[in-house]
Image: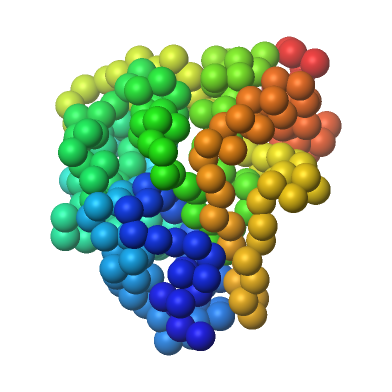
């Protein structure tokens, strides 16, 4: 089986709006001759420009009280969330949004509604690309070789569910301020996303309820998840089990700061 057929077997189809989280290393372990460009072209060919492909291209360019921080350049700052993300960012026909901390690369129909200037004060909340996805009837999260510790949509769920710490920054120990910095200036931020490692507990919950299915081929495990379902189940889970979204006690400084203040 080739990679394109694998994508079709998962359920990737023309016209979908898909946000992709990926591990190229995991993909390559099962499709040894594949390149990052092959992965992207396969997605483009199946989804077509009638649909939308979105990759996070986060750079985390926060202002720091210590004075040592990077400045975001939309055209030149490299993505810090994987090889496929960075490769996709530089592809023909792809545009990138302007959030200094949490930008996205966009291809296809999404560009008719969202532009390079998108940079909301809530970078993963209201007005963001994630928010746009919840309003699309045929939208999905595609996870290629990753688990829910990579689920950016989990941060959107934290915000709309108003978990106790949704607008509390857990990064004071790293001198991070609620300000994004780009070559165009500074931007105050409503929220700063925290640790996502324990989003895997939400993954286990969905698997146990048989609401998501893992697709395995050799050593590659993937998910294609309907965003409407993810939104509905996520609001319930995040509202009622928010304590499970934190790392175990003493395992993570960011989660510890939230636990000490809110639990």
Residue beneath the point at 41% across and 38% down? 137
Residue beneath the point at 73% across and 13% down? 261
As drawn, is 258 to the left or to the right of 40?
right
Coloring applied to the structure: rainbow
As drawn, is 214 to the left or to the right of 33?
right
As drawn, is 1 to the left or to the right of 94?
right
Quarter where residue 215 is shown: bottom right
102 over 10 or under it: above or below: above
Q: Where does residue 258 sit, x and y in percent of width and height?
A: 70, 21
Residue beneath the point at 70% across and 20% down? 239
| Numbered-mark total | 0
Front one among 131 and 121 = 131
Can residue 55 be seen in this snapshot?
A: no
Residue beneath the point at 44% across and 15% down? 190
Q: Where does residue 159 sit, x and y in percent of width and height?
A: 54, 21
Q: Where does residue 124 sit, x and y in percent of width and height?
A: 44, 29
204 over 125 or under it: above or below: below
Front one among 169 and 239 = 239
Name the quadrant of the C terminus. Answer: top right
Can residue 259 be seen in this snapshot?
A: yes
Q: Where does residue 104 sit, x and y in percent of width and height?
A: 33, 42
């Amino acid at each position: 089986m080739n990679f394109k057929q694998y994508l079709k077997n998962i359920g990737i189809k023309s016209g979908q709006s898909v946000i992709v989280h990926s591990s190229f290393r995991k993909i390559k372990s099962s499709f040894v001759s594949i390149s990052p460009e092959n992965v992207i072209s396969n997605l483009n060919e199946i989804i077509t420009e009638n649909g939308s492909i979105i990759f996070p291209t986060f750079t985390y360019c926060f202002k720091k009280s210590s004075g040592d921080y990077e400045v975001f350049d939309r055209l030149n700052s490299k993505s810090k969330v994987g090889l496929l993300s960075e490769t996709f960012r530089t592809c023909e026909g792809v545009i990138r949004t302007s959030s200094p901390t949490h930008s996205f690369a966009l291809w296809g129909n999404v560009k008719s509604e969202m532009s390079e200037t998108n940079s909301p004060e809530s970078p993963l909340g209201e007005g963001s690309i994630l928010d746009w996805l919840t309003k699309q009837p045929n939208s999905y999260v595609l996870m290629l070789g990753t688990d829910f510790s990579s689920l950016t949509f989990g941060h959107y769920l934290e915000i709309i569910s108003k978990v106790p710490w949704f607008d509390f920054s857990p990064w004071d120990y790293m001198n991070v301020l609620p300000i994004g910095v780009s070559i165009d200036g500074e931007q105050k931020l409503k929220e700063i996303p925290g640790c996502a490692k324990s989003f895997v507990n939400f993954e286990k919950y969905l698997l146990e309820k048989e609401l998501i299915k893992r697709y395995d081929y050799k050593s590659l495990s993937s998910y294609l998840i309907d965003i409407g379902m993810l939104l509905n189940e996520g609001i319930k889970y995040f509202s009622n089990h928010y304590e499970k979204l934190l790392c175990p006690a003493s395992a993570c400084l960011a989660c510890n700061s939230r636990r000490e203040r809110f639990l």
